[in-house]
Image (cartoon, rainbow, N blue to C red):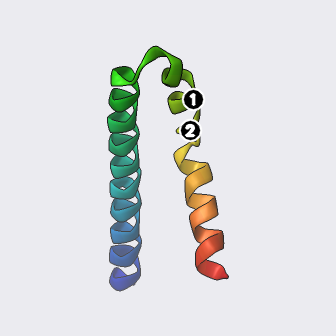
């Protein structure tokens, strides 16, 4: 039982770490968009509109196939 609880805790921590990493990458991309020329700003921001949850769904689907 302790092993199951420990495993679940580790999975939870790992998923939190993945989400935090994704959010940090998104913030870095936003910063890059801010430095882009005005004509490219909107396209740059739209390219990163995907939520972490959608990213994770697509990643899981890719891993299954």
Secondary structure of the residue carrying numbered label 1:
helix
Nearest the viewer among 4 and 46 is 46
Q: Mark 1 points at which residue?
A: 43
Which percent across, then down, holds residue 10? 33, 70
- In the picture, the quarter occupied by the C terminus is bottom right
Q: What residue is drawn where x is 38% and y is 57%?
A: 18
Which percent across, then down, holds residue 12? 40, 62
Q: Tag 2: Cα neighbours inside 10 Å, few (<14), some, or many (≥20)? A: few
Q: Mark 2 points at which residue?
A: 47
Q: In this view, does 22 lie to the left or right of 60?
A: left
Nearest the viewer among 8 and 39 is 39
Q: Vertically, is 6 above or below 30?
A: below
Question: CA separation, marks 2 and 1?
Answer: 6 Å
Q: Residue furthest top?
A: 38
Q: Is residue 40 left or right of residue 33?
A: right
Q: Do the CB atoms of the residues marked 2 and 1 lie less than 8 Å apart? A: yes
Q: Vertically, is 42 above or below 13?
A: above
């Amino acid at each position: 039982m302790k092993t199951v609880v420990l495993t679940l805790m580790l999975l939870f921590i790992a998923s939190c770490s993945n989400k935090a990493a994704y959010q940090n990458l998104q913030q870095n991309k936003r910063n890059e968009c801010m430095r882009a020329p005005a004509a490219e700003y909107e396209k740059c921001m739209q390219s990163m509109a995907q939520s972490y949850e959608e990213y994770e769904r697509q990643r899981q689907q890719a891993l299954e196939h």
